[in-house]
Amino acid sequence: MISCIREDAGEIVLKSENKFFKVKQIHFYKSPKNLHFEELIKLTEENQFREMGAEHFSFGITHDFVSMYFDLEKNDESEWILELPSATLLTIKVYQIQEDNQIYLQESGISYLAHEKYSEHPFYQFPIFNKSRKVRIYIQVNSDEPLTTPIYLWNKKTLNQIDGYR
């Protein structure tokens, strides 16, 4: 059984007994250009991101780049996957900032050639690195279609089982 859908605006806590989370609260910022990581940090420090809560995050028809972030806390060593099941995303950048300030960048989207994509899965999937307990995730996307995407966090074992049926 899939459980643990997060309803509140707080930090998401990942535990091995959890199977799945649907991210329902983010902070977002729209920009006409693709922002560099340093710009995302500056905008965060200046409180330029707005809060949004939703089942699916919808930004309408826009040519803007939408940047989002949320915070995670990992309480064990189980493997987790961030999933964006939206086929119309031209570019996706996922930054993971660890407690020791290490930054991991993963990129994908339909504008990337198959060998350049982070994963070959039809949904965009990115592993959450287990380097620290607390992680801030920034996601930057753009699309030439209406921009709507749910954001899921899957326990890797559960996702592997579910993927056999999708």
Image (cartoon, grey):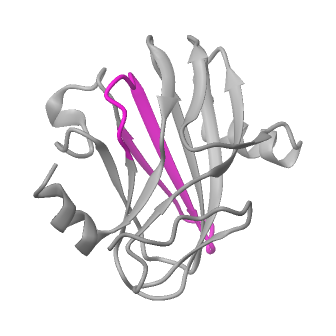
Q: Write the residue at 58% across / 12% down.
A: 62
Using the rendered view, name the quadrant where residue 56 is placed: top right
Q: Which residue is more in the foreground, 7 or 67?
A: 7
Using the rendered view, name the quadrant where residue 160 is placed: bottom left
Left or right: residue 126 versus residue 14 is left
Q: Write the residue at 37% across / 33% down.
A: 86
Using the rendered view, name the quadrant where residue 2 is placed: bottom left
Q: Which residue is more in the foreground, 30 or 51?
A: 51
16 within the magenta span: no
Q: Position of residue 129 (x, y in %)?
A: 41, 68
User: Relative to 31, is 52 above or below?
Assistant: below
Q: Position of residue 155 (x, y in %)?
A: 35, 71
| Number of numbered discs | 0
Q: Write the residue at 17% across / 67% down.
A: 161
Q: Position of residue 67 (x, y in %)?
A: 62, 35
User: Relative to 159, is 112 above or below?
Assistant: above
User: Relative to 162, is 150 above or below?
Assistant: above
Q: Position of residue 120 (x, y in %)?
A: 16, 42
Residue situated furthest right in the rendering: 46
User: Relative to 124, is 5 above or below?
Assistant: below
Magenta residues span: 84-107
- The N terminus sits in image quarter: bottom left
103 within the magenta span: yes
Left or right: residue 111 versus residue 42 is left
